Amino acid sequence: MKSRKEEYAYVIDILPPEVALYRLPPKMRRDFPHDVSYAHLVGEDHFALLEVTLKKGAVVEIGEKVYVGPGTRDKVDKIVRRIRYEDLQPQGKENLRMVVRKIVEQKQDFFIKWINTAGPITIKLHSLELLRGIGKKKVQEILDERKKKPFSSYEDVKQRVGIDLVELITDRILREIAGEDPYYLFATPPPTQTP
């Protein structure tokens, strides 16, 4: 699978240099200055977890959207590596849920298009069943409703089929980020191991 790059990401944790450097493998420690700030981010489009260094003097806040794409970046200096869920500090894991939910809320059009077009993964498994609590009966109800008329918003989904799509998709993305399922609907699979 070709690596999908992020253009923007959200800050989920800010690490003091001594914590960030201690967590790097020894061969990577010597390559990074000991006086820079590190941050953990989650990508906006593919939900990749990133460890980055910040430019000198750059100030970021938890939940802030920053540019991480090619070219000149205003706050991020270098992308050090992709990380796994286990690499996050406890506070970063807590912030991750809040930030992923915020992204899902902001990308309503994308996720409504997904629920209107989602199809089967295998003969026996529909992609809608990957949302926690959605069984075959609820899948059929969703399919019947979207045949009558495509869903138009999160509220429309809630009114017509009684599910909180924001909560279900947030939960699904968090499980994918943590590598808890072999199927990936929204997130880039985590790296097999951190360097």
Image (cartoon, rainbow, N blue to C red):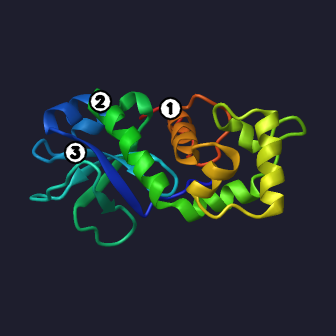
User: Closer to the N terminus: mark 1 or mark 2?
Assistant: 2
Query: Closer to us: mark 1 or mark 3?
Result: 1
Residue 191 on image: x %, y %: 51, 38
Furthest residue to the right? 123
- Disc with the residue nearer the chain's start (1 vs 3): 3
Tell me: 167 left or right of 78.
right
Q: CA distance from mark 2 to mark 3?
A: 12 Å
- Residue 38 bears which disc, if any? 3
Residue 85 horizontal side relative to residue 77, left or right:
right
SS for dot 3: strand
| Residue positioned 22% across, 45% down in the render | 38
Q: Which amino acid is tagged 3?
A: Tyr
Q: List the residue tagged with mark 1.
A: 178
**Displayed quadrant of residue 108:** bottom right
Q: Amino acid at mark 1?
A: Ala
Q: Residue 170 or 4: which is nearer the viewer?
A: 170
**The C terminus lies in quadrant:** top left
Q: Which residue is denoted by mark 2 in the rendering?
A: 89
Q: Position of residue 37 (x, y in %)?
A: 16, 46
The residue tagged with tag 2: helix, strand or loop? loop
Quadrant assignment, res 20: top left
Q: What is the spatial separation of the Cα atoms under label 1 and label 3, in whole angstroms?
A: 21 Å
